[in-house]
């Protein structure tokens, strides 16, 4: 073989040795850029803002009557006439139903079986008059547990009247010191997820209870609107406004990523440039935004998913 052949062979080997890594690097860069482009297509920009930041604490709640009064007959007998339905508003002293005592029931039924005269029936009616079941408070009939003709006994609940509906929730002991009577609150009923209702804190328990090994305190909210569609027993998510901060730097919660080595945001320094994983320190959070203590500044641009991440859909985290 000639020297020319060997020279060409070595040149070919050298070109392959150089070309393969370059081709691999090129393919790597191509697919990396495609992957980056796909990721970017799923992200949207958001500005780091500075301004007033409302801190809220979140907890589950339930709609309950503030004062619930059961109405029970004082003796055995039979319900004769019912004058109200569930949902009716009644005043204190209103008659909800009329009932007969056991003696009246026995005499009237006996007279009917014997075919007694109208005069005899009138005498029984005069001697044993029907007895009213009366509303003890002004409120709404939230339960009717009897029907006309139904026998009843003492201590059997015939009606339940509530003066007003409230939302009862339980706040963690780490937050209860920031909750005060008169504070504004919002709540969302599971039955009406698209509607935010306003309320006020009206009572905070002094005695604690334990839920899931956590010490909590009962807090009552009085709704300010949308009461007509509320029903006792409905569950709700409650947000109590516990603090307002001024001059706070914050970003949408969806822009924040929690990793093993810390918390980061995807910072876009310049348009078209690769994103930078910027570590940040977090402060308080509310249902939409997170306070940034360090890492980015107002006016910076961060990238976030165009739709909420599953299981992280703008839920409020407890303020530490």
Image (spheres, rainbow, N blue to C red):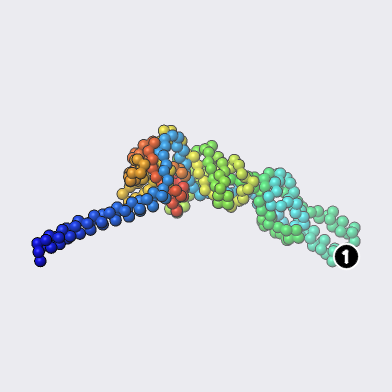
Q: Position of residue 113 (x, y in %)?
A: 84, 66
Q: Position of residue 174 (x, y in %)?
A: 42, 44
Q: Which residue is farthest top?
A: 247
The answer to whether residue 77 of the structure is visible from this angle is no
| Foreground of the two, 306 or 87 | 306
Q: Quadrant of the N terminus?
A: bottom left
Q: Residue at x 43, y 43 (%)?
A: 252
Q: Residue at x 31, y 53 (%)?
A: 30
What is the quadrant of residue 48 in the picture?
Answer: top left
In the rendered structure, the answer to whether residue 239 lies left or right of residue 297 reads right
Q: Which residue is mark 1?
A: 115
In the rendered structure, the answer to whether residue 72 lies left or right of residue 251 reads right
| Foreground of the two, 84 or 240 | 240
In the rendered structure, the answer to whether residue 20 lies left or right of residue 153 reads left
Q: Residue at x 41, y 33 (%)?
A: 247
The answer to whether residue 12 of the structure is visible from this angle is yes
Reply above or below: 176 against 71: above
Neighbor class of circle 1 (other Cα within 10 Å; few <14, some 14-19, many 20+) is few
Secondary element under disc 1, as helix, strand or loop, is loop
Q: Position of residue 71 (x, y in %)?
A: 68, 52
Q: Residue at x 88, y 63 (%)?
A: 116
In the rendered structure, the answer to whether residue 125 lies left or right of residue 318 reads right
Reply above or below: 204 against 247: below
| Foreground of the two, 212 or 80 | 212
Q: Quadrant of the C terminus?
A: top left
| Foreground of the two, 83 or 290 | 290
Total marks drawn?
A: 1
């Amino acid at each position: 073989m000639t020297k020319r052949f060997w020279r060409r062979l070595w040149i070919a080997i050298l070109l392959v040795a150089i070309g393969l890594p370059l081709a691999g690097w090129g393919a790597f860069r191509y697919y990396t850029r495609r992957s980056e482009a796909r990721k970017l297509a799923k992200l949207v920009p958001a500005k780091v803002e500075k301004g007033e930041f409302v801190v809220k604490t979140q907890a589950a709640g339930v709609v309950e009557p503030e004062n619930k009064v059961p109405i029970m007959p004082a003796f055995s007998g039979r319900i004769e006439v019912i004058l109200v339905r569930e949902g009716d508003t009644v005043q204190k002293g209103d008659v909800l139903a009329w009932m007969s005592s056991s003696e009246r029931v026995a005499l009237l039924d006996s007279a009917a079986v014997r075919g007694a005269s109208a005069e005899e029936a009138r005498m029984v009616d005069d001697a044993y008059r029907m007895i009213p079941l009366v509303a003890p408070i002004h409120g709404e009939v939230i339960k009717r547990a009897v029907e006309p003709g139904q026998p009843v006994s003492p201590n059997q609940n015939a009606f339940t009247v509530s003066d007003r509906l409230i939302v009862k929730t339980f706040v963690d002991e780490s937050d209860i010191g920031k909750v005060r009577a008169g504070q504004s609150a919002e709540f969302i009923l599971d039955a009406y997820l698209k509607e935010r209702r306003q309320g006020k804190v009206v009572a905070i328990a002094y005695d604690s209870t334990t839920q899931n090994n956590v010490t909590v305190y009962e807090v009552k909210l009085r709704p300010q609107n949308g009461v007509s569609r509320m029903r006792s027993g409905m569950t709700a998510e409650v947000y109590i406004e516990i603090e307002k901060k001024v001059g706070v730097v914050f970003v949408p919660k969806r822009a924040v990523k929690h990793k093993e080595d810390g918390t980061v945001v995807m910072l876009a320094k310049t348009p078209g440039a690769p994103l930078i994983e910027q570590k940040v320190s977090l402060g308080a959070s509310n249902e939409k935004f997170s306070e940034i203590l360090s890492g980015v500044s107002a006016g910076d641009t961060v990238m976030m998913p165009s739709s909420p991440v599953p299981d992280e859909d703008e839920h409020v985290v407890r303020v530490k």
